[in-house]
Image (cartoon, rainbow, N blue to C red):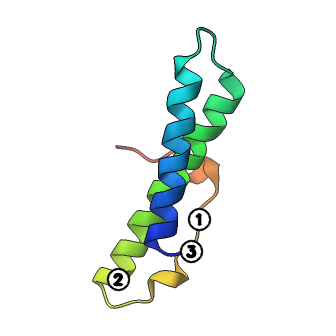
Amino acid sequence: MDDGDVLGRVKALVDEEHKLRAHHEPDAARLAQVEAELDQCWDLLRQRRAKEEFGQNPDEASARPVREVENYRQ
């Protein structure tokens, strides 16, 4: 999966998130799943870009578990 693929997945997830939030009572479980997957995608994109910046192969980056990316501190 290259950066374009990751960004395409992010766009699809953001579109789904907006549709879910547009409902009066959104599906909370699906919304949480979409948000978690978005966090994974953004983390993967950051990993890929960091590897590329430091001369490493960005294709060696991999998605981290949801529990790991959900617990990052901002």
Tell me the kind of residue under disc 2: Glu
Q: Which mark is residue 52?
A: 2
For label 1, the crowd category at 10 Å Cα-Cα, with few meaning under 14, some 14 to 19 and many 20 or more, is some
Label 3 to label 1: alpha-carbon separation = 10 Å
Task: Please identify the quarter of the rendering in which residue 16 is found.
Answer: top right
- Residue 43 lies, in percent from the top left, at 46, 59
Tell me the kind of residue under disc 1: Ala
- Residue 9 lies, in percent from the top left, at 54, 56
Label 3 to label 2: alpha-carbon separation = 14 Å
For label 2, the crowd category at 10 Å Cα-Cα, with few meaning under 14, some 14 to 19 and many 20 or more, is some
In front: mark 3 or mark 2? 3
**Horizontal side, residue 20 vs residue 7: left or right:** right
Residue in view at x 43 percent, y 65 percent? 45
Report if the CB atoms under discs 3 and 2 are less than 8 Å apart: no
Asked if 22 appears above or below 54 in the picture, the reply is above
* Residue at disc 3, secondary structure: loop
Q: Which mark is residue 63?
A: 1
> 41 or 8: which is nearer to us?
8
Asked if 74 appears above or below 60 in the picture, the reply is above
Dot placed on the residue nearer the N-terminal end, 3 or 1: 3
Mark 3 = which residue? 1
